[in-house]
Amino acid sequence: MVFVFGGTIGLASELPTSVDSKDGWKLASENKDVSIYSRAHAGSRLKEFRAIGPIDAPTSAVHAVIDDFENYPNFMPYTLECRLLKRESDSIITYQRLSPKIAEDRDYTLRVWKKSWPGPDGFTYLDQWKTANELGPAEKKGVVRIEICNGGWLLEPDGPSKTRATYSVYTDTGGLIPAFLANYASRTGISRLFEAVRKQVKNPRYGVASR
């Protein structure tokens, strides 16, 4: 799932790992599973979010889960539809439709860039995306179009069999959802997202896919 109500990164060249208070980041919620940070976004009452948490699986298996986007409706929160539209030399184009329960369905098209590089304990994976609605289906009646959804996953090895996962997202909500409600729903959605990935990566198919 790459959308939550609320908002994080513009696709910067540096890795999305910093949550320095000097950059405006504040701890929004924390437990043993995930720490969620937020900061103000210029010109908006919606916040940017960055979440960091451990996952008990190698980065290759976790990335296989995240890369299984066409199966998202079966395990990712709120996801009603997710499909590949096009593969390009440096990216893929995907369409997603979400049913967030508290509001009308939302949809958007994304361009996703993928990078990976080896290290002593395994591969690091970086997926980053930006909205690309002009490359996807036209707007549908009864479905709110999301105009901004920028974010990413960074998966770093924490030893050979664990992953330090960083999830970042900034998005508009579409429609007339109050900012305080949107920001609260973001924190809840991010926690559910990490839960879904942790549960799904236990499926042996992802270990096989990563090899």
Image: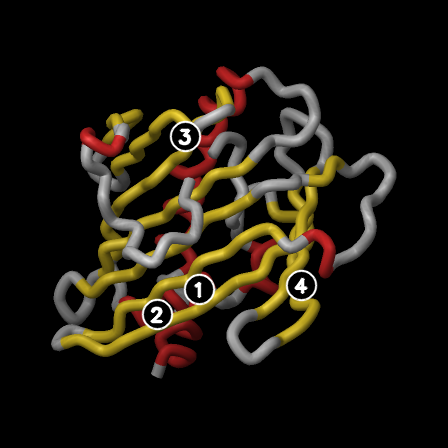
Q: Is residue 181 above or below residue 2?
A: above
The coloring applied to the image is secondary structure
The numbered mark, 3 or 2, whose residue comes first in the sequence reads: 2
Mark 2 residue element: helix
Q: According to the image, label 2 marks what residue? A: 61
The residues bearing labels 3 and 2 have C-alpha atoms spaced at a distance of 25 Å
Amino acid beneath label 3: Arg
Q: According to the image, label 1 marks what residue? A: 65
Q: Residues within 10 Å of mark 3 (few under 14, many from 20)?
A: many
Q: Where, by quadrant of the figure, is residue 71 drawn?
A: bottom right
Mark 4 residue element: strand
Mark 1 residue element: helix
Q: Closer to us: mark 2 or mark 4?
A: 4
The numbered mark, 3 or 4, whose residue comes first in the sequence reads: 4
Q: Is residue 149 above or below residue 136?
A: above
Find out whether the residues at labels 2 and 1 contact each other: C-beta distance under 8 Å.
Answer: yes
Q: Position of residue 63 (x, y in %)?
A: 38, 66
Q: Where, by quadrant of the figure, is residue 19 drawn?
A: top left
Q: Closer to us: mark 3 or mark 1?
A: 3
Image quadrant for the C terminus?
A: bottom left
Q: Where, by quadrant of the figure, is residue 135 drawn?
A: bottom right
Q: Position of residue 95 (x, y in %)?
A: 67, 57
The numbered mark, 2 or 4, whose residue comes first in the sequence reads: 2
The residues bearing labels 3 and 4 have C-alpha atoms spaced at a distance of 25 Å
Q: Position of residue 5 (x, y in %)?
A: 53, 32
